[in-house]
Amino acid sequence: MPEVKTIKHDALETNSVTQHYLEDDTAVAIYNLEGEYFASSDVCTHGQAFLSDGEIRGDEVVCPYHEGSFEIRTGEPVDPPCVIPLDRYETRLGEDGYIYITIE
């Protein structure tokens, strides 16, 4: 499983999300929840909206399109109209200060 270097951890504020594109143009959402880093597909499974444009509410990301939400840690849908889970990527903080994600 390849590991991909993404962004510096200090570029992502606590309780926020940002977008990062992989080499194949896949959009990934990278989250910082109280200093823990998570990553998922950035496109909502309900509509063509970027979750990185959404809002973080507690442990959830709220889609800006129809206000559905997902649990950031698991990718599971929480509020309708979202019913399909997000693809998730394992993350780790490298010694160089970058966030790495594992692509399967």
Image (spheres, grey):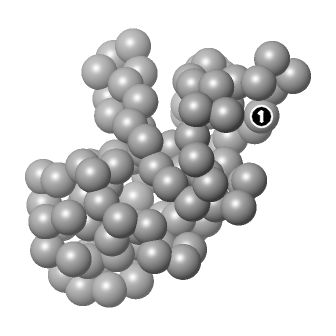
User: Residue 82, percent across and down?
Assistant: 26, 76
- Quarter location, residue 47: bottom left
User: Residue 10, percent across and down?
Assistant: 67, 34
Q: Is residue 88 visible?
A: no
Q: Classify 62 as above or below 86.
A: below
User: Residue 83, percent across and down?
Assistant: 29, 78
> Can you say which quadrant of the picture contains the C terminus?
top right
Depth order, front residue of 6/9? 9
SS at badge 1: strand
Which residue is the extreme one toward the bottom?
79
User: Residue 45, percent across and down?
Assistant: 25, 61
> Can you say which quadrant of the picture contains the N terminus?
top right
* Identity of the residue drawn at 71% across and 61% down: 34
Depth order, front residue of 64/74? 64
Would you name the residue on which mark 1 appears? 93
* Identity of the residue drawn at 57% across and 25% down: 7
* Identity of the residue drawn at 56% across and 24% down: 6
Q: Classify 58 as above or below 15.
A: below
Please state if 6 lies on the left or on the right of 78 as rendered.
right
Depth order, front residue of 104/92? 92
Q: Classify 82 as above or below 85.
A: below
Q: How many marks?
A: 1
- Quarter location, residue 94: top right
* Identity of the residue drawn at 72% across and 54% down: 36
Which residue is the extreme one toward the right?
95
Depth order, front residue of 34/88? 34
Q: Classify 70 as above or below 98.
A: below
How many neighbours does mark 1 have within 10 angstroms: few (below 14), some (14-19), or many (20 or more)? some
- Quarter location, residue 61: bottom left
Please state if 68 lies on the left or on the right of 34 as rendered.
left
Residue type, label 1: Leu
Q: Is residue 97 visible?
A: yes
